[in-house]
Image (tube, coloured by chain):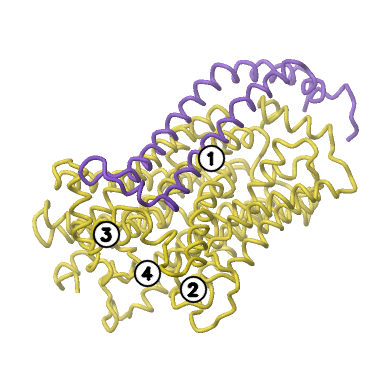
Amino acid sequence: MSTDTSNPYVAVQESPEFAGLRKALRGFVFPMTVVFFAWYALYVILSAYTRGFMSHKLIGHVNVALVFGLLQFLTTFLIAWQYERYSSRRLDPVAEQLRATVESGGTR
Amino acid sequence: MILAVASASTTRSITITLFVIFVIITLGITVWASRQTRNATDFYAGGRSFSGFQNGMAIGGDYMSAASFLGIAGIIALNGYDGFLYSIGFLVAWLVALLLVAELLRNSGKYTMADVLAFRMRQAPVRTAAAISTVTVSIFYLLAQMVGAGALVALLLGIKPGTTFLGMGANTAKIATIMMIGALMIVYVTVGGMKGTTYVQIVKAFMLMLGAILMTVLVLSTYKFNLSSLLGAAAAKSGKGDAFLNPGLVYGKEVAGNATQTFYNKIDLFSLGIALVLGTAGLPHILIRFYTVPTAKAARRSVLWAIGIIGGFYLMTLALGFGAAALVGGAAIRTQNPGGNTAAPQLAQALGQKYFGGDIGGAAFLAVIAAVAFATILAVVAGLTLASSSSMAHDFYANVVKKGQTSERQEVVVARFSALVIGAISIVLGILAKDLNVAFLVALAFAVAASGNLPAILYSLFWRRFTTTGAVAAIYGGLISAVLLVFFSPVVSGFSTSMFPKEDWHWWPLSNPGIVSIPVGFLCGWLGTLLSRRPADEAKFAELEVRALTGAGAH
């Protein structure tokens, strides 16, 4: 298949609306991936190297390691929830509109 | 001996009865689903008719395997805090799937992982590589489940070395169980396809969550809903004291006077950690679940539900594991199963005795949880078999052998036949592997998925210049490096805990290959792309990207 401007996919891909959608998606998911991965890696590294700190007791038998682990659950839930909010507000409407554009462009 | 003879036979009959009921219900669903299965979309993708919630439950059912339920509870029960690392890694992993993969894959693919990988590439080489990788990951994963089932049955039927059940010794019972599980999964997949399999997984997820919630509430109420008292009791009964609640008993162990080994152990912990997080979004049986919903939005919803369900379950592994340590005790668990795989059922027995009236109550609750464990294994193996047979039929047969010149009807026939073959192969391998240490099989499946599949998927979706050579290099590079490093690692040879304890060909110090093989996968994909003679197909990438982001032209 050669590049031709009559291809509705190429036309949409080159449109500013699509560039905006791509930027909005990547602008959320890439930084967020870096953040949660770094946060998780920090947890693993602390578990490996700072045993004294992780073993520090906070309340009764509840130590830093356990709280840190539970925080990983909390952040996972929060990030998932934030992504749902972000995508239904910022991504879905644009995607829907562009989809209509492509499909009216007579593909398949 | 843990069970008295009378309660052992009670347990047996309740377990068998409940399991038979589960099998009858799920077979009924399967037969019903087969009537609804008219075309290839029904067989491969359940007609794309499931809701986000249904698919979220099914993802939970597909993902929470014997390794999650029995394995993690066992590791926590025996080694305390370190087992929690698995729970965290297995959950955080879902963010990769949610943010980077689920919706884009749903929009641009049709039936298999390779639909996306091969979208803008030459079909034959990429689909062949993807089919090989899919089958490899699934078979490792399958083996772990089947061997786990075999190990479980000896406990559940109360068969000890030297005793028999219906004239079977432990060995025969294990073989019989593996054959029965294999036969059932073949029936689910060949008859029910994705629709039947999905319902089986939903029912299983429901049972597993109910069982876990009940056990968690009973454990917590034993300690008046005070987490600290539970932890204290667990540490006291574990025989390891406070160290039980801290990281370091199994992973990243510090070996006094051996700085090199200590260093390797810590790197190994990190290697395991990243394989857990990056593996999930490369597991073919998980990826094809996203095709069972009608839209990308529903795919997102299903991952959100899955994160809620799976997260809730993994939080409960704390109560199950520490509860088993506190109420059953490390010594009693080790006596029954050195790997700790029976901690959760043993905890059920202890809780049943305490709350449901003595030995009979204990036996009954053990039986219920045992039946749940069998249902768990069965649903997961069905999902795995479906993923590999779909890939054999849709990727290898239809698009490589027949070069796309085949009817969908024919494809489904081949898929059903592949399910039979893959089922038969895993029965044979499961029987051969029945006495091996199986924990590494799941970890290996995750490492292979993270090294071989994830780089290719991410490059395909996000990197404009990615080429056929790059995709093939990424898959084989990651796959081969992961498998080779495991082969030459301490898990396979050289140590008393190895698969082959009497041989020694190991030269690689780490048990988990991820820290090397995942970067190798990414590096191979990048190098392969740079060295490609043909540039990427710009128009096809435009089509893939627009479809992935907008859902235009989605199947």
Residue B355 x/y as whole percent: 11, 51
- Disc 2 marks which residue? B433
At label 2, counting other C-alpha atoms closer than 10 Å, the crowd grade (few under 14, some 14-19, many 20 or more) is some
Residue B14 x/y as whole percent: 23, 60
- Disc 1 marks which residue? A37
At label 3, counting other C-alpha atoms closer than 10 Å, the crowd grade (few under 14, some 14-19, many 20 or more) is many
- Disc 3 marks which residue? B345
Q: Amino acid at mark 1?
A: Phe
- Same-chain status of marks 2 and 3: yes
At label 1, counting other C-alpha atoms closer than 10 Å, the crowd grade (few under 14, some 14-19, many 20 or more) is some
User: Is label 1 in a helix, a strand or a loop?
Assistant: helix
Of badges 1 and 4, the one in the foreground is 1
Along the polypeptide, which appears first: circle 2 or circle 3?
A: 3
Residue B323 x/y as whole percent: 23, 53
Q: Amino acid at mark 3?
A: Pro
- Same-chain status of marks 3 and 4: yes
At label 4, counting other C-alpha atoms closer than 10 Å, the crowd grade (few under 14, some 14-19, many 20 or more) is many
Which chain letter matches label 1? A
Q: CA distance from mark 2 to mark 1?
A: 35 Å
Which chain letter matches label 3? B
